[in-house]
Each structure stands twice: as C-alpha cells, then as structure tokens.
Image (cartoon, rainbow, N blue to C red):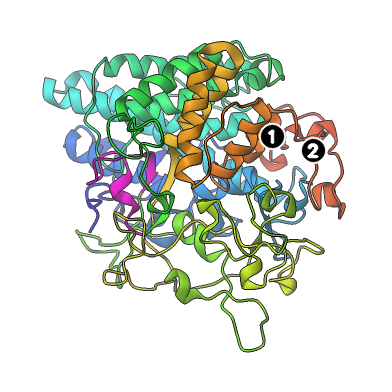
C-alpha cells in the first residue's frame, strides 16, 4: 500500500468552499460534499485546516473532483484531470498520437484545428485555472492568520505555502505555454476581482522569480522528499522547463533564448542530487536513472518517485494513484485514489481487447487491465522514429517500444483514417504504462500482481530525471556547457533503451531522442514549437486535416482563450481566433 492516506486526507472538502471566482471568470463549480471546511475554520485549528485543505489542493491535480464529482462543469469529468488536460493540448494534435472517437468534446482537436467555443478548450483551460485558484485560496487564508501562529505552526505554514506556489507554477506552465497572454492571479489578487491579462513575457518573469525565490528559501543541501508532495526539486524542474522554452515565451523564437544558462544551472543541481545510484551505462558512472525504462510506468512505480521506497528516484514530480476493490467516500481512512486520467488513461485509452473476429492481437490480459477503450493510435511519422529491425515493424531494438502493439501484433503503421471503427489498421499502439508490478530486473512480477481493475493504481510521472538530462544537454548544445557532457547525458538515455552510444550529436538528433524518450509525457507540442517544426518545416498524417499533412496557419502557435471566459472578462483573444 502506498503511503497516501495523509496525501488525500482532505478528500471530503468541497471544492466550492475555496472561493474560486477571482481566477476562473464565470466557470461554475459544483458544491459536491456536505463536509465543507471553510476558511473561517482556520483560526480554530490551523494545523488541521492546512492539512485537510492541502489534501484537496493535491486532489485537484490527481483526479477530476471530490467523490467522483467533476469540478469542471459542461465537460466530460474523466477528461478534466490535470494530466489529461495537458495530454489533450500537448499530444493529441501532434505526430505522436490522436484521439479516434468522433465525439463533440474533441471535435477537430486531433487535426490541430481548434475554435474558441470548443468545449475541450474550456475544459482544459478551466482545469488549470482551478488548480491555480485552490493554491491561491490556501495561501490567502493562511496569510490572513499567519501572525497568530506559533513558531512551529508557522514553519508548517511556510512549507505548505511553498508547495502551493510550486503547484500553481506547474499549472501556469501549461496555461502560459498553450494560451500565451493569460490572466495572472496569485495570493495578492483580490478575491472576487477579475485578474488582469498579462503579456506572456511578464507572466514568465513573475513565475520564474517566484520559483527562484522558493528554491532560495529551501536553501542549499539535500532536502527531505515526501512521496506525493512537491518540494525543492520540483521547483527546480519547473524552472528547467520554463527556461528551456524562454526563447518562445520572451521572443517567439525557440533558438534566441537568453536563459540557456539558467536552464543548465538548475538541471545540473537536480542531476547532482541523484548521482550515485541507478543506471550506469558504458561510462560506469551511476546516473540516478532507473535501471529499466518499464519500471517507471508499472503499477509499483511509486517506489521510483522522490520519497519512494527505492534508492533510485527518477520520478521528480509524481501524481499518486492507488486502486482498491472498494472505496467508501465516508471513510476516515480512504484506500483509493484513482481517476480516468493518469495511469488509467495512459493504458486503457490505447487498448483494445481482441475478439475472435479481429485480425489484430491486443488483449487487456497482456497489460493486466480491466478495461480497453480503443481510443488512440500513434501517427506513422512518430512510429518510424524508432530503430525497427525490419520493414514489417515486428522487431525493434529500442526497449521503449516493448509494450507496443505493432507489426508483430498485426497492427498497421499507416493512418489512412483516424476513427475508432478502423482500430488496428490506423496506427500502432504506443503503450508504455501497465498494471503490472515490475521487479528489479525489469520483468513483470507474475506472483505479485494488482487486481485487473478498470481504474488502475499506476502513478503518473509529470517530470522525470530523464527529461532533466535531455534539457541540460539541449542547453549545453546552445552554449551553456560542455558538448562532451551533453553527449554523455544523452547516451545514458540511449543505452538504457538498449541502443548504442553516439560518438557525436546534433540538435536534430537530440530533438528526436527527446521524442523517443518522453513520448506521450506532455512535452511534444512544446518541443515542436521550440524547434520551429509545429507550424511548418515538419508534417505528419492528418496535420491540419489533410491526409498527408499540411502546414498550420501561423496563428495556431497558440490555442484560443475560451470565448465564454475571455469575452465577459474583456480579455484580448489570441490572434487569428474570434
């Protein structure tokens, strides 16, 4: 059993009690539990209030709402988790995957064509703003009573405030990245007011300064990591992501980035904290990476997260999930934290379950899952980036494809149509998550397997050390450090995947290695924009709703702001959208 009981201690707190109106415009939130803890309760028992409300803050990142009630109305609750919102925006329109059901929620999302009144745009944007709002509300409530606390309680309050600032910055990463000039709200924004829409560059500067201040508050030296919570390394990892893309956010040019040095600095600090254990590679220096790729995506991957039971903690920011056969919402000791996002989504959305009439071979049993949605397929151009040993795509040298359903399973690599009826003949299944426990040798443990439930307990790695290595390498290739060290870092990634080490490396090769390592981990659209390959310069099947792919309109570099929020608030819509 994962140690998550304290993590979800606030599961009974109603989302509607947290005063979101200042951050989400006219978004309607559900009052979905009668065991409400109000801000006025803070003064009566500050420690209990903080622990319970922080539980609810984390809950908004882990699932779609309290007691299976979605916090986002007018949008499929299962889709409205933090992870799935990021996936929809970062992965579905790209060369890595697509969403095949022809439903109104996604519309033309899989083709990269989005309108300001699209329900999915409203739902995803609202999820991130809800996450911002719960963090701000907590900080404001604690700040109002801060000087009435004793010293010990102030230390706890300071830590939780830091965590809220980190989590808020994580939500703002996707808002800033995908929507550009967004409303910015923090603990200084008056409750009930409409937050000002700031230029992207200004928000970037505010957020990165906030994170830098948080890192400075933690100080030098190792920090005690608690499983499921964010801390110093998550703040540093977010700074790596922000600084890696600073050229886009400040100048609109991924190459012209004034923060390569800052990206490298924080990446190196994280890497240094992990060195000495884990995968070694040909240079025999322990990298801190897990020894086997599949260990990071199995049912027991919690042990590889910061604060986990293994000495190797590659997963820096983790979203915990925990499955059980029964969950009683009224229990004081809940035993389940699951959702239709995270590990469940990343497995079941790909899967089909073969019948006697199907020519393709994919079963729930292979992955120990209790459900199969038949909703996703990989695009041909992405699948071909891997080192296949033959033209039939039945054998691949890259261990990162070992869970795939490809040519060997009689799946076709081409994408003649993108619909659910042609499952098996419209692309490979690029699966990386399972519901198996993975042992120290990287094998599935047949003697210790979780129940094959529809919602599984596999955690979701938001940021991994592998991403930090690749980001450091990119910064070094742009002059922030030693190119030889950049090659060393990327060869850790390649050799763990069973591939030969490179003797030299270009930015283009690094770009594709990043794709192979981090596929479907909510980086792809951002990476393509940074490398100047999103609008034009690279195409994939059904890009811009053309079978062989076509360039996007330049305005597609940003998504539209939801019209139902932007119009009443008087926000300026992104160029090219109504």
Query: Dot 2: what SS?
Result: loop
**Residue 323 placement (x, y as % from top left):** 33, 64
Q: In what element is the residue under mark 1? A: helix
**Residue at position x 51%, y 40% in the image:** 494
Image coordinates of residue 153 in percent, x first then y, are 15, 27
Position of 487 compared to 219: left or right?
right
Whether residue 254 is situated above or below residue 423 in the rendered picture:
above
Is any part of residue 191 visible from this angle?
no
Q: Is residue 566 above or below residue 210?
A: below
Q: Cβ–Cβ below 8 Å for labels 1 and 2?
A: yes
Task: Specify the segment rendered in magenta.
Answer: 299-319
- Counting from the top left corner in percent of width and height, residue 128 is at 53, 39
Residue that label 1 marks? 528
Q: Residues within 10 Å of mark 1 (few under 14, many from 20)?
A: many
**Label 2 packing within 10 angstroms: few (<14), some (14-19), many (20+):** some
**Quarter of the rendering occupied by the N terminus:** bottom left
Judged left or right of residue 226, residue 79 is: right
Viewer-proximal residue among 201 and 245: 245
Circle 2 sits on which residue?
Answer: 538
Q: Which mark is residue 549?
A: none
Please state the horizontal and vertical placement of residue 499, each as a whole percent of the image: 53, 44
Describe residue 102's horizontal placement relative to residue 492 as left or right: right
Residue at 49%, 14% (x, y): give it: 262
Distance Cα–Cα, label 1 vs label 2: 9 Å
Vertical relation: 448 (above or below) 93: below
N-term mark: 1 or 2: 1
Which image quadrant: the C terminus?
top right
In this rendering, the answer to whether 395 lies above or below 13 is: below
Q: Residue at x 47, y 41 (%)?
A: 495
Question: Of residues 261 and 553, which is closer to you in this image?
Answer: 261
Q: Is residue 243 visible?
A: yes
Residue sitting at 49 percent across and 47 percent down? 498
């Amino acid at each position: 059993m994962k140690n998550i009981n304290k993590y979800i201690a606030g599961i009974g707190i109603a989302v509607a009690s947290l005063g979101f109106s200042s951050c989400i415009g006219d978004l309607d939130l559900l009052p979905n539990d009668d065991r409400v803890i109000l801000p006025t309760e803070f003064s009566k028992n500050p420690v209990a209030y903080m622990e319970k409300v922080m539980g609810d803050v984390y809950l908004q990142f882990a699932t779609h709402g309290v007691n299976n009630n979605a916090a986002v109305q007018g949008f499929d609750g299962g889709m409205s988790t933090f992870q799935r919102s990021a996936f929809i925006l970062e992965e579905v329109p790209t060369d890595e995957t697509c969403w095949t059901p022809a439903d109104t929620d996604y519309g033309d999302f899989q083709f990269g064509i989005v309108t300001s009144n699209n329900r999915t745009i409203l739902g995803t944007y609202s999820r991130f703003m809800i996450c911002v709002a719960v963090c701000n509300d907590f900080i404001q409530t604690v700040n109002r009573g801060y000087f009435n606390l004793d010293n010990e309680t102030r230390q706890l309050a300071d830590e939780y405030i830091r965590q809220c600032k980190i989590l808020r910055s994580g939500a703002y990463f996707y808002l800033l990245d995908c929507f550009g000039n967004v409303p910015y709200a923090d603990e200084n924004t008056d409750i009930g007011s409409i937050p000002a829409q700031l230029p992207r560059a200004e928000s970037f500067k505010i957020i990165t300064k906030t994170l830098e201040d948080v890192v400075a508050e933690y100080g030098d030296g190792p920090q005690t990591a608690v499983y499921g919570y964010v801390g110093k390394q998550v703040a540093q990892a977010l700074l790596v992501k922000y600084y890696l893309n600073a050229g886009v956010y400040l100048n609109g040019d991924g190459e012209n980035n004034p923060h390569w040095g800052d990206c490298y600095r924080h990446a190196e600090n994280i890497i240094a904290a992990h060195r000495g254990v884990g995968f070694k590679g040909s240079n025999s220096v322990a990298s801190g990476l897990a020894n086997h790729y599949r260990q990071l995506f199995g049912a027991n991957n919690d042990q590889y997260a910061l604060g986990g039971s293994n000495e190797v903690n590659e997963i820096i920011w983790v979203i915990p999930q925990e499955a059980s056969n029964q969950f009683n919402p009224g229990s004081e000791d809940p035993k389940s934290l699951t959702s239709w996002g995270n590990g469940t989504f990343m497995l079941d959305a790909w899967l089909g379950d073969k019948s006697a009439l199907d020519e393709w071979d994919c079963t729930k049993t292979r992955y120990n899952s209790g459900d199969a949605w038949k909703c996703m397929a990989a695009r041909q151009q992405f699948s071909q980036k891997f080192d296949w040993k033959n033209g039939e795509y039945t054998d691949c040298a890259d261990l990162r494809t070992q869970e795939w359903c490809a040519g060997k399973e009689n799946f076709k690599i081409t994408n003649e149509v993108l619909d659910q009826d042609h499952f098996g003949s419209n692309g490979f299944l690029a699966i990386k998550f399972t519901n198996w426990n993975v042992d120290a040798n990287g094998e599935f443990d047949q003697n210790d397997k979780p129940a094959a439930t529809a919602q599984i307990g596999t955690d979701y790695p938001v940021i991994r050390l592998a991403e930090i290595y690749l980001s450091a390498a990119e910064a070094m290739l742009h002059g922030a450090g030693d190119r030889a060290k950049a090659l060393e870092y990327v060869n850790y990634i390649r050799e763990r995947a069973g591939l030969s080490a490179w003797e030299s490396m270009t930015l283009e090769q690094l770009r594709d290695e990043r794709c192979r390592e981090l596929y479907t981990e909510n980086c792809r659209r951002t990476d393509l924009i940074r490398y100047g390959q999103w609008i034009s310069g690279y195409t994939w099947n059904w890009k811009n709703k053309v079978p062989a792919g076509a360039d996007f309109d330049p305005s597609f570099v940003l998504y539209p702001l939801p019209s139902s929020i932007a119009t009443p608030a008087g926000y300026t819509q992104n160029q090219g959208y109504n």
